[in-house]
Every structure is written in structure tokens, then in C-alpha cells.
Amino acid sequence: MITQPNRKGKFSSTIRQKGWFRSLTNNRGMTLAEMLVTLLLVGLLSSGTVMLGASGARMASRASFDAECEALKDALNDARDRAMMQDANREVDVDIRNDGYSINTWDDQAGKFCTDSVAFEHIQASSAKGPVDPKYHYRVRFLPSGTINKGQTIRLNGPGQLKRSLILQPVTGRIRLSN
């Protein structure tokens, strides 16, 4: 409906436009074709949202896996630093299990080894030969010089197909993560 001023200057709704405007003023409801098109559009939009949500979950899973791998690398670097700073020239051992790791350091005040354990949430450690038996573990011993007793590569498996390798170099004591 289009409003135009009449002779007295007041607006009245006397002129109607042809076409789609006229159908909007009709209060009969929607036709079956209009309803199907509307439902189709709503379905397409909602499926796109679900697909974006699934890819977002994968990205979050990847980010948490990478963060946990970096935390393990940082813990190993910290253990190497502890070994170099201890006054009694003692080694620091890190035991990497299938489900977590523990750092064993000597406490002079207590006169015994202290263990700090951390459980993995997104990582499962394995070797090149396959998964680690839960009864066993990798022992990484950091010497007071900051070197590692033996070099090794530990595979870190995450959810889905996520994989990284933790590479321990014996001579330099360098620890790095590869993709």
C-alpha cells in the first residue's frame, strides 16, 4: 500500500501497487512451494554451521595436542637445567610412560629423590617399534654436563591422526619436536 496526500494535505492509503506488494497484503499464509524453499534454506544454513563446528573441534584438538607436546618439551628442558644446576653433580631422570611422565630429582634437604608426575591428556607415547607397554617407560637421564645418556626418538600420538616426534640428541642434549 502506498500513501499519498489527499486534497486536504492528509495522507490516505488509497493506491495499491501491483505485483508482489499485493501478495504481501493478502493474509492467506504461505504456499507449499514457499514453505519448502524456506525449509531448504534453513537446512542448508544449519548444515554449514555443523560442518564449521566439526572443523573447529578438530582445530581445538590439534591446538591442545600441540600445547601438551610443547609442555613435555619444556619439562625436559627444565630437567636438563636442573641437572646442570645441582651442586652435588647428580643426574636428573625423566621417565616417559605411555600415559604421562615423571621427573626424579635429588633433594639434599630431605636426603632422597623427589618425583614430580604429570599425566597426559591428549598424548600417547610410543617408539618406532610400536606402543610402549604400560609396565615400561623411556628413561631419559640428564647428566650434570647437560647431555643425555643416550639419544632416542619418541613418537607422540594424539587424537585422530595427530603425530609428532620428540627427538633427544645425546651429545648436545638438545631436545626438539618435529611435525
Image: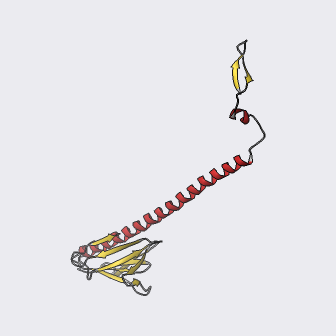
* Residue at x 72%, y 15% (from the top left corner): 6
Residue 136 location (% of width, % of height)? 40, 86
Decide which of 63, 95 is in the foreground and name it. Answer: 63
* Residue at x 57%, y 58% (from the top left corner): 50
Residue 58 location (% of width, % of height)? 48, 64
Task: Quadrant for the C terminus, please.
Answer: bottom left
Residue 93 location (% of width, % of height)? 32, 80
Quadrant in which residue 141 is drawn: bottom left
Decide which of 29, 95 is in the foreground and name it. Answer: 29
Position above or below: 132 against 86: below
Residue 130 location (% of width, % of height)? 40, 83
Judge whether residue 160 can be spotted in this image.
yes
Decide which of 15, 108 is in the foreground and name it. Answer: 15
Q: How many marks?
A: 0
Position above or below: 85 against 131: above
Quadrant in which residue 2 is drawn: top right
Judge whether residue 92 can be spotted in this image.
no
**What's the image's color scheme?**
secondary structure
Task: Quadrant for the N terminus, please.
Answer: top right
The residue most toward the right is 28
Position above or below: 69 against 29: below
The residue most toward the front is 19
* Residue at x 41%, y 69% (from the top left corner): 68
